[in-house]
Image (spheres, coloured by chain):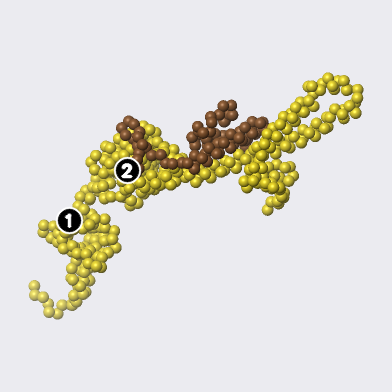
Chain colours: A yellow, B brown
Amino acid sequence: MQPSLFSTQQWTVTRLTHYIRDLLETDVTLQDVWVSGEISNLSRPASGHIYFTLKDSSASLRCIMWKTGAARLRLTLKDGMAVEVHGKIGVYDAGGQYQLYADQIRPTGEGVLYQEFMRLKAMLEAEGLFDPERKRAIPERSRLIGIITSSTGAALRDMLSAIRRRNPLVRVLLAPAPVQGDEAPPKIVAALESLNRRKPDVILLARGGGSIEDLWAFNDERVVRAVANSSAPVISGVGHETDFTLCDFAADLRAPTPTAAAELATQITIDDLRAELDDYQTRLFSSTLNLVAVQRTFLSAVSARLRFVSPERRIQSDIQHLDDLSRRTSTSIVYRLQLQVKHIEGTQQRLDALNPLAVLRRGYAVVTRKDDGRVVSHVSQAADEMRVRVSDGEFEVRKKT
Amino acid sequence: MAKSSSPKPVEDLTYEQALAELEAIVSALEGEQDQLEESIKLFERGQALVERCGELLEAAQLKVRQVAGDSIIPFDEESS
């Protein structure tokens, strides 16, 4: 066909390029694509962006990765490296080229691992291994913490220092196991079994960060099943915040890092224990002082009754009963009350020997109600007017309303 | 309830044991109690338990051991 000299539409290069760009950039497939190939012409200028060409046996594709994406890259790119690149296709107007704007690059083969991960995850999920109802609570107050990790890794040091810092009263039992490589899964399973025989309160299964291959032992079906079947609750702390392994799903609790796992296993810290002990000590003193006050009140009541039933008074009022009264003295309430008062006085002295004042000198104060003299050890017992006893005297206070 | 008949010397108690006994004593003292003499005994025992727990907290040092086959051996952090 003969081209018309007077076409109805005249295109500029820019307009045509924009038209092509729109075609490519509105195509859903091209905007979210994984491409595998070999890296060549790799260049990394001072701008920080990465430029390379992705090739296979019969085609090539220009690729660019912006500085922000390049900074997040976990592998070092080299010419000749087989990779899978994710990104979107766009057009570079000035060069008249379409190219792949890459946002993720992974070694070839990781995609296969990912497929395997998803397959295993779906299978174990269907079996109910990851059900929330299976998750057990982590004890707040663990006494024996089991740890499974490499005995030489930073993860172990991090966990031990976190536990030491938070609660050194805890005992740690380590079952060392390699955390990567072919021998890792059976060794981790064996470590779980041998720790469970020692009945720890909780088990930490951890390793530091690494590539998906490095962490692969924690996606091994044998390991995942052993974690799900552990008698002691398991906290997983594998890799970094962003890494998820199947062990994380099977564990009773997932921690983002080994250190976080150690922290979750020591929810009650030594500071909490100190505060708890202080509280018990305060209650020990206040309850005992309260008992003393009650006994004191009882004592004065008994003294009053004693005066009321005094023999003198009886003799004065009815001298005729004198003989009878004398005979009954040994068994009378008078006699028994006297005995009891003596007893109370004796224990009172012992109590004084304990000297609650010594406590007061340490800065404690005893608050009593002005009306009945009872010790105030609970807010509910506070009265409008109260006395505060400190080491060298006492003063009155009025409750603020 | 912690009976004062023949209590273990506090030095022989672990932190957990001492704390459990202290807890029982405080509950008893806070409950209905009119035997003053018994209360004083409990108070004295409670004081000793508080001291024992305090000592253990101050002296606490993380104990790390490791499983080796069927036995448990000390774990040397320095050499790891």
Q: Position of residue A251 (x, y in %)?
A: 36, 42
Amino acid on which the number 2 mark rests in the picture: Ser
Q: Which residue is mark 1?
A: A81
Name the residue at 24% across, 55% down: A75
Quadrant (top left, top right, bottom left, bottom right) of the N terminus of chain A: bottom left
Q: Position of residue A176 (x, y in %)?
A: 31, 39
- Using the image, name the chain to which the residue with label 1 belongs: A
Name the residue at 67% across, 46% down: A391
Task: Single out the residue that lies furthest toward the left.
Answer: A1
Helix, strand or loop status at disc 2: loop
- Using the image, name the chain to which the residue with label 2 belongs: B
Mark whose residue sits in front, 1 or 2: 2
Q: Is residue A370 visible?
A: yes
Front one among A299 and A123: A299
Name the residue at 77% across, 35% down: A301
Helix, strand or loop status at disc 1: loop
Q: Estimate the spatial distance between the alpha carbons at disc 1 and disc 2, rounded to whole Å.
A: 39 Å
| Side of A391 where A309 appears, left or right | right
Q: Position of residue A371 (x, y in %)?
A: 74, 44
Q: Is residue A100 above or below residue A377?
A: below
Task: Give neighbour class at mark 1: few <14, some 14-19, many 20+ (Cα, 10 Å).
Answer: some
Task: Single out the residue that lies furthest toward the bottom.
Answer: A6
| Side of A105 where A358 appears, left or right | right
Q: Which residue is mark 2?
A: B79
Q: Position of residue A42 (x, y in %)?
A: 18, 62
Name the residue at 39% across, 46% down: A161
Front one among B12 and A33: B12
